[in-house]
Image (spheres, helix red, strand yellow):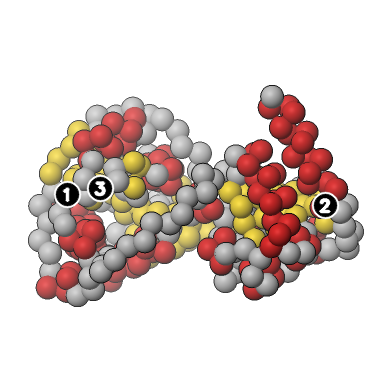
């Protein structure tokens, strides 16, 4: 089978879940070859091989951490030239989409971003995308060059398929533009102990109905009982009740969890655009006419200040 190049997203060598999803999707169209940049390739190769990587190309250089994006594009291009893949798959993060776009320009190939599914086609991989605020699903394929495709987190359930996963060192030559933008400082993000919003299997979001920052602990309590990430609508963020980094919507983050719980959110199109591809949607709102109820799988008409604490208590009691 043809080889499919998969860009590995990791934190200090710990492989993140979207990469395992990419390996699962890559196996539909070929043999996955993983590209790991930075330290920890030998350790990462164990899990990459477990999920189907036939080999792991590895490169480690200070440029990957000291400069923005371009050194990683140089490395991805080197891997592309070494493998001659049938497709290149990259996680659909903000950085991932920039890396993918730059590679596509360099190699003269078509680019598909934010795919939610991938399948083999007679004329190359076919990607599904959710468009127009998730009102439609389209299927597309690249007609020029090697397809470069970014895939949204939670688009596929990771499936183990043990393969060799041997590590091979990749020689990377950095271009003169690779050191153009230097990272001068980093501030660690404060950990909440909750999953990353865009990668979480369950998301609980609060909106205008939460009625104040002091009440978001109710939303956090439900999220913690479910092992979920916490999101917020634009109205809640604009009011200063919750950080912008947690905003779900067209001008915030797009999520596609297995379960999305919307509490006190009316369901404006701006918000729906960021969560409409969730597998199961539950809404809690005291307004029975709220637009969110047109979208949901399950709806609860009631005051969130009564429903959410009761639900949290019930979940915790069943857990323990």
Q: What secondary structure is marked by label 3?
A: strand
Residue 242 spot, x, y in % from top left = 62, 63
**Which residue does the image show at 58% across and 49% down from the upper left?**
229
Residue with the most extreme top position: 320
Residue 16 vs residue 214, the one in the foreground: 214
Residue on which disc 2 sits:
305
Residue on which disc 1 sits:
59
**Which residue does the image show at 36% across and 34% down from the upper left?**
51
Q: Which quarter of the rendering shows the C terminus?
A: top right
Mark 3–mark 1 contact, CB under 8 Å? yes
Q: What secondary structure is marked by label 2?
A: helix
Q: What secondary structure is marked by label 1?
A: strand
- The vertical placement of 66 against 18, above or below, is below
Residue 10 vs residue 98, the one in the foreground: 10
> In the picture, residue 146 is in which quadrant?
bottom left
Residue 223 spot, x, y in % from top left = 65, 45
Mark 1–mark 2 contact, CB under 8 Å? no
Residue 72 spot, x, y in % from top left = 24, 60
Q: Nearer the viewer, mark 2 or mark 3?
A: 2
Calculate the distance from the C-alpha at mark 1 to the C-alpha at mark 2: 52 Å
Q: Report crowding for label 1: few under 14, some 14 to 19, many 20 or more residues within 10 A (C-alpha).
A: many
**Which residue does the image show at 45% across and 33% down from the upper left?**
159
Q: Which mark is residue 78?
A: none
Calculate the distance from the C-alpha at mark 2 to the C-alpha at mark 3: 48 Å
**Which residue does the image show at 30% across and 46% down from the upper left?**
12
Residue on which disc 3 sits:
35
């Amino acid at each position: 089978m043809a080889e499919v190049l998969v860009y590995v997203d990791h934190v200090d060598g710990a492989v993140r879940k979207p990469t395992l999803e990419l390996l699962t999707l890559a196996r539909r169209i070929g043999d996955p070859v993983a590209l790991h940049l930075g330290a920890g390739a030998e350790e990462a190769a164990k899990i990459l091989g477990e999920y189907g990587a036939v080999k792991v190309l590895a490169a480690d250089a200070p440029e990957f951490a000291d400069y923005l994006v371009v050194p990683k594009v140089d490395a991805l291009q080197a891997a592309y030239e070494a493998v001659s893949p049938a497709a290149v798959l990259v996680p659909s993060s903000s950085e991932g989409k920039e890396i993918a776009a730059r590679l596509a320009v360099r190699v003269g190939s078509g680019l598909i971003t934010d795919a939610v599914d991938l399948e083999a086609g007679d004329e190359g991989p076919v990607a599904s995308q959710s468009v127009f605020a998730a009102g439609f699903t389209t299927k597309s394929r690249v007609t020029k060059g090697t397809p470069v495709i970014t895939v949204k987190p939670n688009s596929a359930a990771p499936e183990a398929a043990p393969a060799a996963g041997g590590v091979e060192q990749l020689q990377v030559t950095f271009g003169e533009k690779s050191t153009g933008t230097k990272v001068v400082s980093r501030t660690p993000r404060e950990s909440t102990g909750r999953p990353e919003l865009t990668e979480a299997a369950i998301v609980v979001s609060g909106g205008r109905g939460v009625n104040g920052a002091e009440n978001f602990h109710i939303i956090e309590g439900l999220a913690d009982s479910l092992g979920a990430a916490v999101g917020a609508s634009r109205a809640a963020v604009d009011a200063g009740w919750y950080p912008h980094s947690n905003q779900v919507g067209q001008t915030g983050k797009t999520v596609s969890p297995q379960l999305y719980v919307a509490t006190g959110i009316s369901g404006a199109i701006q918000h729906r655009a960021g969560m409409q591809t969730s597998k199961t949607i539950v809404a809690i709102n005291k307004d029975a006419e709220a637009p969110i109820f047109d979208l949901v799988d399950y709806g609860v008409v009631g005051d969130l200040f009564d429903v959410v604490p009761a639900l949290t208590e019930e979940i915790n009691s069943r857990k323990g």
